[in-house]
Image: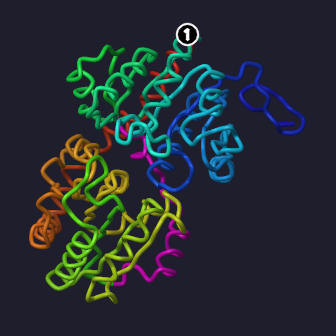
Amino acid sequence: MRQLNGTLTRDGCHRFKNMKTITVLGNYSGRNAGDNAILGNLLHDFSLVQSNIIFQIPTLSPRFIKSNFGQYQVRPMGMMPWNFAFRNFGWPLYKAMTKTQMVLITDNILFDRKFNNPFVNNLKSIAFFSSFCKRKGIPIVLYNASIGPIDHAAGAAALQNVLDASALVITRDVQTKNLIEDLKLRHPKIVVKADCALNTQVPSLLRIQEIVEKEDLYTNPNGTIGLNVNAYVDNWSKKGSLSRDEFCKIIAGTADRLIEQLDVDILFIVTQVMDIKITRECVGHIQRKSRVRLVDNKKYTYQELTALIERVEVLAGLRTHTLIFSAATGIPMISINAYPKSVAFLETIGMGNWNISLKNISVEKLSGLIQRAWNERGKLRTKMVPIIELEKKKARESVRLVMDLMQ
């Protein structure tokens, strides 16, 4: 017989009389290490405070949710055509948002890019079903969230629909607060906290050493610099001016210059499966390939990738959560600006000057900025770590705000 939170069961199973249900909306299908980190840390943070919650998670891969987060009380809800779903629109999302006690909208899924395409855009579908939440008295909370870009009237109107059904906005950056206010939208209380992925826990040293030996990493006594790219290059929100080939050659040229001038190795860290191809294209243009390694989230978990990032000296990247993983372990980072949320995050942790625009990127400018960060890495780390510790604490405080609403 085993006791769990005051309930005794003969088979070791714990059954709650008063289970609560929370729906968590985000891109949780396993392809993005950043999304995985948000969900994993969210579930962990709530488990420290409340144990009688079932988390409903709309997903393209219920198997992924069960195999990776099955230690928590999760209920994956398939969003494939046989589930009567047209990706982000259909019966599963309606059920998830109306058969629950609360809806958490996480990450950066409220934007109006490709507004009418449910394969890309979440805002239109969520806005439509938000009216049902409002009628049923089901509170929506923007949790660990960023918003934007919102460039069109239809997007602003849809966002207003979501906010009208929301009880609280917990954002991870002040820019989201400013966007809502600049658009002059009605809104509930806005609280600025921090990204829960900052609290990612790394695996054991034994496991990391296995990966290091398998991938032949960190053999250079001079150190390793981390690089990260993404498949969107500079056209995530609007059509960019930089071609894919031009971008790859700039990244490759930067890697070669860093190898030549600093005598370091280069580690490419892929945190979104769709970025593996373009990363390999970048590596293909590098002259000193023997000094380059690549690890990706197809093989390794977000916790393992975070631990590998912890061993580089400096990281420069496009994916926001790659930068967040770097911050989580106290590694100075440079944002190659592809998303507004990346700039917002760096400003939050006092690294706002350490970014470069894709509009003006070149081998000279990017390698120069990375070398400057390399030279100042000790000072940057000393300045950054106390701020990050406060941000980690702020991230955990978000759970209490949600639980207060459920009383």
The relative height of residue 156 versus residue 115 in the rendered view (above or below) is above
Quadrant position of residue 50? top right
Residue in the image at 56% along x and 35% along y? 89
On the image, the x and y values in percent for residue 133 come to 55, 17
The relative height of residue 194 versus residue 128 in the rendered view (above or below) is below
Give whichever of 157, 33 is nearer the camera: 157
Residue in the image at 41% along x and 19% along y? 161
Residue in the image at 38% along x and 27% along y? 170
The segment highlighted magenta reads 194-219
Q: What element carries label 1?
A: helix
The relative height of residue 140 versus residue 90 in the rendered view (above or below) is above
On the image, the x and y values in percent for residue 256 come to 21, 82
Q: Is residue 197 magenta?
A: yes
On the image, the x and y values in percent for residue 5 come to 71, 28
Quadrant position of residue 254? bottom left
**Residue 118 horizontal side relative to residue 59, left or right:** left
**Residue 261 horizontal side relative to residue 230, left or right:** left
**Residue 355 horizontal side relative to residue 277, left or right:** left
Q: Is residue 322 magenta?
A: no
Residue in the image at 14% along x and 64% along y? 361
Q: How many C-alpha atoms fall within 10 Å of the one at disc 1: few (<14), some, or many (≥20)?
A: few
On the image, the x and y values in percent for residue 258 come to 19, 78
Q: Can you say which quadrant of the picture contains the N terminus?
A: top right
Check disc 1 and report the residue beneath it.
135
Instruction: Name the residue type under label 1.
Output: Arg
The relative height of residue 145 versus residue 326 in the rendered view (above or below) is above
Q: Can you say which quadrant of the picture contains the C terminus?
A: top right
Quadrant position of residue 55? top right
Give whichever of 317, 111 is nearer the camera: 111
